[in-house]
Image (spheres, grey):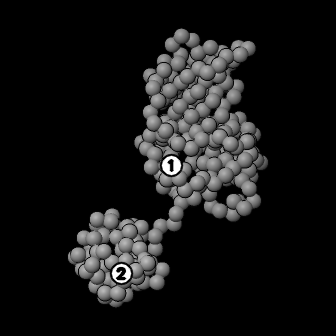
Amino acid sequence: MTETPAGEKIQKVLAHAGVSSRRGAEKLILEGRVRLNGRTLTDPAIRVDPDTDKLEIDGKPLPPPPEKPAALILYKKIGYVTSRADPHNKNTVYDLLPPEERGRNWLYAGRLDKNSEGLVLFTSSGALVQRLTHPSFKVEKQYTVRVHGNPGPGGLEKMLRGMEIEGKLLKADSVRKTGFHTGEGTYEVVLSQGEKRQIRRMFAELGCQVRYLCRTRIGPVGIEGLAPGQSRRLTDAELRRLLGDRSGAGRRRRR
């Protein structure tokens, strides 16, 4: 069997196409189910060129590898809604994207309300949106929050234990007071639950009013280096961390 010396290992090519794992690919070859350029393969160590060689599995052409997902982060400004189109609001987060990015079918992973600012993540992958937004994956989102009023001695503990609001149990992963000035406290809040306007509703239940809210992190990806209205593509390393992250940037100790 002729191989392509400078090509890729066939196990890697089959795994990249989503046919099987690398170990599973070797099993397929040894079972005689893989054909290369019309001939049955018997050597799992062979190298191939996926661009020029014709590979078949069980008589069917090898499917093309899935498109590599793309992602970018945006520092959302206050006054913009997280929606592709809204009949009641002229300004959407898509208007903040640079012109060269607007033609792509970007999906956003998680909303920020109109009066909040901070990190919004866009991706071409519906699977990544599901991973970042479904509560079963427990991906952390971190916020800086400025609050008018005092939650009281046990208020923050209530947020950690869980608060039943409108028939749902809302809870924070961590809450830490970071400052206080002229009647307003500043807090760092981490959530993995992600109910609508969750932080505002929890503080309101404690008799407080959120005056400012900024999302600063989603999983391992932070907003550092961006000003309001700016965006950038994620690097390959950031995207790999995001795809491999099941628990945010690690569980934080509850306070």
Please state if 238 lies on the left or on the right of 6 as rendered. Answer: right
> Can you name the residue that lies furthest to the bottom here?
38
Please state if 143 lies on the left or on the right of 55 as rendered. Answer: right
Local crowd size for mark 1, using a 10 Å CA cut-off: few (<14), some (14–19), many (≥20): many
Report the quarter where the N terminus lies: bottom left
Q: Position of residue 85 (x, y in %)?
A: 69, 52
Q: Position of residue 111 (x, y in %)?
A: 61, 43
Task: State which tag comes first along the sequence, 2 or 1.
Answer: 2
Q: Position of residue 64 (x, y in %)?
A: 46, 74
Q: Which mark is residue 242?
A: 1
Local crowd size for mark 2, using a 10 Å CA cut-off: few (<14), some (14–19), many (≥20): some
Q: Which mark is residue 56?
A: 2
User: Is there a contact, CB below 8 Å, between mark 2 and mark 1?
Assistant: no
Q: Does residue 22 lie above or below 1 as drawn?
A: above
Q: Residue at x 60, y 48 (%)?
A: 121
Q: Residue at x 47, y 67 (%)?
A: 66
Q: What amino acid is at disc 1? A: Leu
Which of 168 and 181 lies nearest the eye of the viewer? 181
Q: What amino acid is at disc 2? A: Glu
> Can you name the residue that lies furthest to the left here?
31
Q: Which mark is residue 42?
A: none
Q: Secondary structure at mark 2?
A: strand
Q: Position of residue 241 (x, y in %)?
A: 49, 49
Which of 166 and 187 lies nearest the eye of the viewer? 187
Which of 217 and 82 lies nearest the eye of the viewer? 217
Real-space CA distance between mark 2 and mark 1, rounded to the nearest whole angstrom = 33 Å
